[in-house]
Every structure is written in structure tokens, then in C-alpha cells.
Amino acid sequence: MSNGVAGEARPRRAFRVFLNLLFGAAGFLFLGGCTRASVPISTAAPPRSTSTISPIRTIRPTLAPSPTSSPPAQPTSTTGPTPSGGAAELIFGIVERIGDAYTYGPIIRYHLVDNRATEVTQGGYELLGVGMDGDRLLARRDDVLVVLDMQGTEKVVLTELLYDSPGKPAVWIPGTRSIVFLETGSAGARVVIVDEGGGERRVIRPDELSPREVMPPSASAPLVILGEPCASPAQCESAYAVEPTVLDVKPLTDRLRPVFSPGGQYLAYLYEEGDRRRLALAPADGSRQVRMGVPGDNILDYVWSPESDELLVIALVRSDYSGRWFGARQFLLTPGTWSMVELPSTETANAKGIWSLDGRQVILAGTEPAEGGYEVTLRRIDLVTRDVQILEPPLDLVRPNYVFLSYMAWRALR
């Protein structure tokens, strides 16, 4: 009997063991499924697509701070100075030298944020200035001086007797609706001031001034006119300060190619040292002269900041042995403290610089050898981080002959 009970108990225990295993496995699977489902799903937002500021390539100078991780600012309309990285355009005119002659055009609008370029003119116009509202351009067509709209249409003809100047024959006075130009007259060139619509024409002391060139001004007053007497037939650079409101003219003795700061407090100008030209700063009253000792072989360009507190200087670097140029060095000079800081250098010739409207950036335009000829290059330097960006507008800036920019301006979008 005991053998019979024991014989029946063994299969029952085996069956219970089987059931325990079965439900244990099911419970494990159920709990495992609940545990997997309880893992939180990441709620992080996917990366946003943002408009990145051209260029594609970035050069970082030695010891430059790392850029911030914040996304670039998006284009916004502005009624004042453009914030760093905000909506802005570069306006520039292209010039190609063919033998002893020059071919002008096109004039380009280049949107910095969207990396979009538009031709205002296809050719035949030399860009000389941009109006205070940013919707008018000053340009020359042979001996004709005109005001263009942003579609390249001639709105006003200012003169058909524009003087054939070795430098700038006309400028738009910053912050005003007035234009100054040199006009060919019966007794030589004369200085004319006219509003952008062509009215209220005034001539500045034609009997006492023999002008040859107008220096690009940093502010509305005073202007600087270069003219006779001449150091040589090819060098008529005697400087005169002109107050356009009262038509007063005052000589600037021993000042080569001077430019007043926007506030009128300081003067930047050149002086000769052997066969080279160096740069000096001085208070506008001439009470002192500070020779800044800018390195380099010749000064290519010097431009005041919007706040008059710094001067951007571009100096050519040339080989003493071969005479070939190696590029340009850029410096920021501070009047008052008379200090100098070097920015990253570039491998360009014929360099030209401008300040952004907020004074936080500078843009450099230069010429470099390229496959098929020469190329205009554009670089933007952030003055806080010292980062250098190579701007790459979507248009061909390579020419078979030497090419450069006649004029460049930073235009805020409104």
C-alpha cells in the first residue's frame, strides 16, 4: 500500500514542480515586460535646424578663445545698427585691371546670414558710396556721376563732367543726404556739394582750391580734399579740411592723406620715412603727433571705428629681396592711450577694411592668386574672440586679370 501511495505521490510532485516552473517563468516574463515598459523614453527635443553664418571654412588664430556654443542669431529686421550676427548685407563693387585700363562691375549685394548674393549692376559702374538710408548707391559711368536704386536703375544724374581723379572723385557724406564730387570746369576741377536728389548745388571756393581727389570721410565733417601744390606731377596730395555747412577751407600742413575720426577729435595720416609711408595719429588741434610704429612696408588702408575709439590699419608685407608681397598685417590702434594690438594676418594684396555698424567686427577684402588668375577674398574678424571666418559668397570672384574691390560698405537691413 505504501508503495502504491508513494508511486502516486511522485507524479503529483512532478506535476506541481512543472506548474511552479511554468507560472514562475510566466511571472518572470510578465514582470520583465512591465520593467521594460517602465523605462522612461527620452523627451529631449531633436536638434534644431538653424541658419549658419557663412563661411564654410573657419581659421582660428593661435591662442584664440573657443567660440561659444550658442546658435547663431537669426535674421531680424532692425531700425538701428545691426547686432553682431544679425541681418546685414555687404555692398561692394568689383574692378578688373586689364593692361593699363580698368573694367568696372558688377556691384554686388551679399547677405551675410543667408549667404545670398545679388547683382545690382552687371557692369559699367564703379561703386563710390552708399546713402544714409541704404537704398541708394553713388556710382560713376565713365564721366557721368549717378545715383542708383538697389535694382541698378539710374534715378539721378548729378553731372556729366566728373573729374578724372587718380583717386576718389566723389563721396557720399556719412549720415547725410549730401554728395561731394569733383567736376571738370573751364579752369580745372572744382568741388561741388549737392543733395542726393540733384538739387541745392554749391561750389566750394573755386578760385582758392585746385582739387585732385576726395578722401573717403568717416563722418559728416570735416571733409578732406587733396590737391595742389603737388610734390610731383603724379603726387598732388596737399590736404585741406573743408567744413561743408559753411564752406570753410583750412590747409592741413604736413599731413599726407589725413582722415578725421567720426567725432572729429583725432586725425590719422601718413608721413614719409625714406621710400616708405608710415602712419601717425594726432589730436585734431595738432597739439601733438604720435608716430605709432606700425610694422609693415606700406600702409594700404586705415579706417576709424564708428565710435572713434579705434583705428583699423592694414599694412603690406613685402620681400626686401624680391619685391614680392607676402600678404597684409592688420592692427587696431587706440588714440589717447596710443596703444596697438595686432589682429590675425592675411595672405592678400590690395587689402581694404570696413567696420561693422556695431563696431564688434571688421571685414577685410583682398586679392590672392588663384587657379585661372586672381581672386577677391572676404574675411570677417570677430574683435572679441579674434576668430577669422572666410566668407564664401555664392558667386565667382575669380578673374583672369588682377581684380580688386573699388568700395565696400556694411548695410543694415531695415
Image (spheres, rainbow, N blue to C red):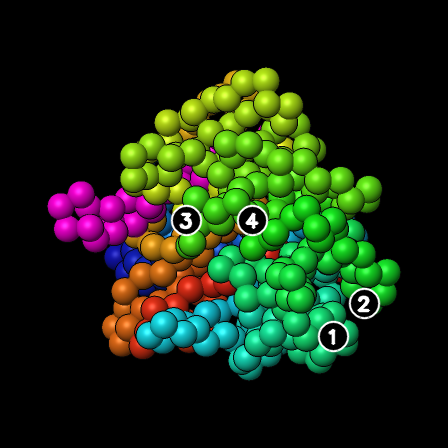
Tell me which amino acid carries mark 2: Gly
Badge 1 amino acid: Val
Q: Is residue 42 magenta?
A: no
Work out whether mark 4 precedes mark 2 in sequence or the reverse, and give the earlier one: 2
**Residue at left offset 66%, top offset 72%:** 161
Mark 3 residue type: Ser
x then y, percent, for residue 95: 46, 70
Question: How far apart, in angstroms, are the residues tagged by discs 3 and 1?
Answer: 34 Å
Q: CA distance from mark 1 to mark 2?
A: 7 Å
Q: Secondary structure at mark 2?
A: loop
Is there CB contact under 8 Å for labels 1 and 2?
yes
Q: Which residue is mark 4?
A: 227
Q: Quadrant of the N terminus?
A: bottom left
How many C-alpha atoms fall within 10 Å of the one at disc 1: few (<14), some, or many (≥20)?
A: some
Callout 4–callout 3 Cβ contact below 8 Å: no
Q: Quadrant of residue 64?
A: top left
Residue placed under numbered mark 3 in the picture:
232
- The residue identified by callout 2 is 198
The answer to whether 64 is drawn above or below residue 155 in the figure is above
